[in-house]
Image: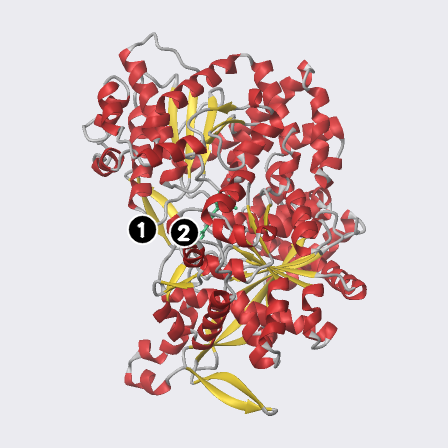
């Protein structure tokens, strides 16, 4: 462990002077914001000292560098996490207290950068943490959006979006590096020219913008390694203020050029399931790919010269989904056009350097671009893609009887479109899915034709989570208990959580497990009271579903269950259930009407139930607005039931399932995504599994059977009643009824099998909650889940990437 401060006294001295020099005020006159900023600046400068050491070590040992290209990094707040990773949290807390400052209060001033939508972006951030912990020279490469994912407010039950102005008070972790800026060209046309007796291509008459990097330190636990996340911002190439226009009084025109350039990095696309054909999105993708590659190659050149054959030996480039798919053609362009390599040599280097992770099988999320749009914006890149495509066709094995179909499935250019998934696979030496079932589906279905051609490329890397953030930091009550029982080794090596098994039959310990959970529920209840004015009772079961809203994730199934319990309770006062608080949180893509209506339904049901004194001892419904990393860290530790109820075969992996499991929640879920690994690790008896399996879902879909109306008619008291309540007055009081949901489910024949899984789901819930009254048994299950969750640390995931993909 690196020593960051010799003593508390040294910290106090350095901190005081940092506060005063940054604010220009005597310490007593400074605000909490001044104090927060100065603390971050101090920790950041200490981190950079370790970063310099890391950098020297990497250079000396010739360690391979790994670049993780991702259009999203959902990093969360860093201060608390870095204090923990540097081993100075207590020292700093005590030092601050001596100065009359409260660390927890200061931490509230840190922005929670929403530079990602959900699972994919958060995974990238967890990987940065683990790469630094594992001593990998691993760097994030992404986008610095001026506005992150929209802020969600709930108005009359409905989601309202407002801009997320996370930069308005500055971001003290970042360092702007104008010296590393890269010029990026769009549009123009390609011309041939002669260089050293060789015909070459270049693009002329381009419209250029400047990609300016901002570096954020990534501090690994143990303080041995500090890496960096580099995010790119778009700016005009030169000062372009049009004074003439200004003097005419046309102020918008005066600054138009700047506005056009800055638009590229202005905003994160608020969709986690596809965004088709938007020019600005394509510009974002090219900007961070091209600028990122340029800085990767600069570093390589400065260390190894221009012997590009060596690139795959010293550099791995990982592409997080297809958003950075242009890495392949862009690397080809640089190697051929700028470095003068022949196609075959450049291709060999490119494919040995690049690897690709797929995160979804949803057809609407598979990225495609109209050739017309693409070729106009990036003419030279498009030529290279055409050549990749031509060679793929020419080299295609035409001996198999179904070769034509296979070629159609794997073609990069098809039907007037550039297919980014095909491009990603072809340019990579490794293709992986994110949980076992997902990789199997990729092999068998989504990418089956590639799998038949190159089975050796395919592998699985089940996702993981940053256990230090989501257990140690988010759940201090439980973490303390764990450390008292098994020591601190689990922070370094999450497998050590398995030692908790020894305490599963220790009644006193189990009681403490329950007490920690209760403390966390009180903490969340206070947050909910502050944020929503709602009273929730920490003595009820906390049943939690927190994730993006999507039809396949079936928040609708969950709220149908709540409606059903409410209805049955009103009909039959003798109907008993364990008192429960149903907690939901998550955002819906702004253009996704069904998901937004589901949010409105949940809030409308909440409005009725929470104001009905007949049921309030038994149930409450709570929608926590604006789900993000910081409030997620309050929610996971308080959960007792983890709702993981996606239609089987649809959720690639899920990661909230892992976070909740690690915090001792019992999974109520389908056999989907990483739920399957959860069951395998913790034992089926320690989770509650229900519903159709993926093969059953496939079979039902293939049968083309129409069952929705039969189910509706066959169960008038429960399912039928719920469907009717969507359009009658029962829940319409807040802001109207829910015709479109009814329409969707009945006329689309229950496409997500909400009705099909309804009864087994409610039954499973009733059985699970009935077992809650035996607290000792429940706490034992909870502890067993935590003890079994070490494998889900992203440290493990990253070691697998390192050993099996990157060779770093
Ligand atoms: C095309 C674009 C707008 C786009 C942007 C973000 C498309 C997709 C996404 C994000 C996808 C995503 O978050 N997928 C999730 O990735 C997680 C990490 O692997 C999985 O756990 C989760 O099952 C999957 O839905």
- Measured as percent of width and height from the top left, residue 433 is found at 54, 46
- Measured as percent of width and height from the top left, residue 46 is found at 72, 58
Q: Nearer the viewer, residue 614 or 122?
A: 122
- Measured as percent of width and height from the top left, residue 430 is found at 60, 55
Q: Secondary structure at mark 2?
A: helix
C-alpha distance separating marks 1 and 2: 14 Å
Q: Is residue 628 rendered to the left or right of residue 594?
A: right
Residue with the mark numbered 2: 365
- Of circles 1 and 2, the one toward us is 2
Q: Quadrant of the C terminus?
A: bottom right
Mark before the other along the chain sequence, 1 or 2: 2
Q: Nearer the viewer, residue 653 or 55?
A: 653
| Colour option used | secondary structure
Q: Secondary structure at mark 1?
A: loop
Query: Which numbered marker is on residue 332?
Result: none
Res 102 visible: no
Q: Indicate yes or no: mark 2 CB to ligand 1 under 8 Å.
A: yes
Q: Residues within 10 Å of mark 2 (few under 14, many from 20)?
A: some
Q: Residues within 10 Å of mark 1 (few under 14, many from 20)?
A: few
Query: Which numbered marker is on residue 591?
Result: 1
Q: Splitting the image into 4 quarters, where does residue 712 fall?
A: top left
Q: Nearer the viewer, residue 699 or 129?
A: 699
* Residue at x 37% of width, y 26% of height: 757
């Amino acid at each position: 462990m690196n020593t960051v401060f010799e003593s508390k006294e040294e910290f106090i001295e350095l901190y005081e002077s940092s506060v005063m020099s940054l604010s220009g005020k005597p310490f007593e006159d400074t605000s909490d914001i001044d104090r927060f900023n100065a603390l971050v600046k101090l920790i950041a400068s200490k981190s950079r000292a370790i970063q310099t050491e890391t950098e020297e070590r990497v250079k000396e040992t010739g360690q391979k560098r790994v670049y993780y290209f991702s259009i999203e990094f959902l990093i969360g707040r860093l201060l608390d996490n870095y204090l923990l990773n540097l081993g100075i949290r207590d020292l700093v807390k005590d030092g601050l207290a001596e100065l009359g400052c409260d660390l927890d209060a200061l931490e509230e001033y840190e922005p929670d950068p929403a530079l990602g939508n959900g699972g994919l972006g958060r995974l990238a951030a967890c990987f940065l943490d683990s790469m630094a912990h594992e001593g990998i020279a691993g760097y994030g490469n992404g986008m610095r959006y001026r506005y992150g994912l929209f802020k969600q407010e709930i108005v009359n039950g409905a989601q309202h979006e407002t801009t997320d102005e996370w930069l308005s008070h500055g971001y003290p972790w970042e360092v702007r590096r104008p010296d590393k800026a890269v010029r990026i060209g769009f549009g123009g046309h390609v011309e041939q020219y002669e260089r050293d007796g060789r015909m070459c291509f270049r693009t002329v008459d381009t419209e250029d913008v400047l990609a300016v990097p901002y570096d954020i330190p990534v501090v690994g636990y143990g303080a041995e390694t500090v890496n960096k996340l580099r995010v790119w911002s778009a700016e005009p190439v030169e000062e372009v203020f049009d004074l003439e226009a200004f003097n005419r009084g046309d102020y918008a025109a005066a600054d138009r050029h700047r506005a056009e350039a800055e638009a590229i990095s202005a905003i994160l696309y608020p969709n986690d399931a596809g965004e088709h054909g938007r020019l600005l999105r394509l510009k974002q993708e090219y900007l961070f790919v091209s600028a990122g590659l340029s800085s990767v190659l600069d570093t390589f050149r400065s260390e190894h010269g221009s012997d590009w054959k060596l690139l795959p030996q010293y550099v791995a480039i990982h592409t997080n989904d297809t958003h950075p798919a242009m890495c392949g053609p862009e690397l080809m362009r640089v190697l051929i056009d700028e470095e003068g390599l022949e196609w075959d040599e450049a291709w060999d280097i490119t494919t040995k350097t690049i690897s690709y992770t797929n995160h979804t099988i949803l057809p609407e999320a598979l990225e495609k671009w109209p050739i017309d749009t693409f070729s106009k914006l990036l003419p030279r890149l498009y030529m290279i893609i055409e050549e990749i495509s031509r060679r793929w066709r020419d080299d295609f094995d035409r001996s198999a009887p179904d070769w034509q179909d296979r070629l159609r499935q794997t073609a990069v250019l098809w039907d007037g479109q550039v297919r980014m998934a095909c491009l990603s696979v072809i340019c990579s030496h490794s293709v992986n899915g994110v949980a076992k079932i997902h990789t199997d589906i990729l092999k068998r279905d989504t990418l089956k034709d590639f799998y038949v051609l190159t089975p050796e490329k395919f592998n699985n890397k089940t996702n993981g989570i940053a256990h230090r953030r989501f257990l140690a930091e988010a759940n201090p009550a439980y973490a303390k208990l764990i450390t008292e029982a098994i020591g601190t080794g689990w922070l370094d090596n999450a497998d050590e959580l398995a030692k908790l098994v020894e305490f599963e039959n220790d009644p006193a310990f189990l009681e403490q497990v329950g007490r920690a959970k209760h403390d966390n529920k009180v903490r969340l209840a206070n947050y909910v009271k502050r944020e929503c004015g709602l009273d929730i009772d920490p003595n009820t079961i906390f049943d939690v579903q927190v994730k993006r809203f999507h039809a396949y994730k079936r928040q609708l199934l969950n709220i149908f269950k709540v409606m059903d319990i409410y209805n049955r309770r009103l009909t039959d006062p003798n109907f008993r259930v364990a008192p429960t608080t149903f907690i939901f949180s998550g955002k819906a893509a702004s253009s996704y009407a069904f998901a937004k209506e589901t949010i409105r339904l949940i809030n409308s049901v909440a409005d009725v139930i929470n104001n009905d004194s007949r049921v309030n001892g038994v149930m409450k419904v709570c929608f926590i607005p604006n789900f993000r990393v910081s409030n997620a860290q309050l929610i996971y530790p308080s959960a007792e039931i983890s709702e993981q109820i996606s239609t089987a075969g649809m959720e690639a992996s899920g990661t909230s399932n892992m976070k909740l499991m690690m915090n001792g929640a019992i999974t109520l879920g389908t056999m989907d995504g990483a739920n399957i690994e959860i069951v395998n690790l913790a034992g089926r008896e320690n989770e509650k599994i229900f519903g159709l399996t993926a093969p059953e879902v496939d079979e039902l879909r293939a049968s083309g059977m129409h069952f929705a109306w039969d189910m509706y008619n066959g169960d008038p008291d429960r399912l039928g009643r719920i469907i009717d309540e969507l359009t009658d007055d029962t829940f319409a009081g807040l802001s109207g009824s829910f015709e479109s949901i009814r329409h969707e489910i009945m006329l689309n024949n229950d496409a997500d099998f909400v009705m099909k899984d309804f009864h087994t789901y409610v039954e499973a819930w009733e059985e699970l909650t009935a077992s809650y009254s035996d607290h000792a048994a429940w706490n034992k299950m909870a502890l067993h889940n935590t003890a079994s969750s070490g494998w889900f640390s992203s440290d493990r995931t990253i070691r697998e990437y390192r050993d099996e993909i990157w060779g770093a």
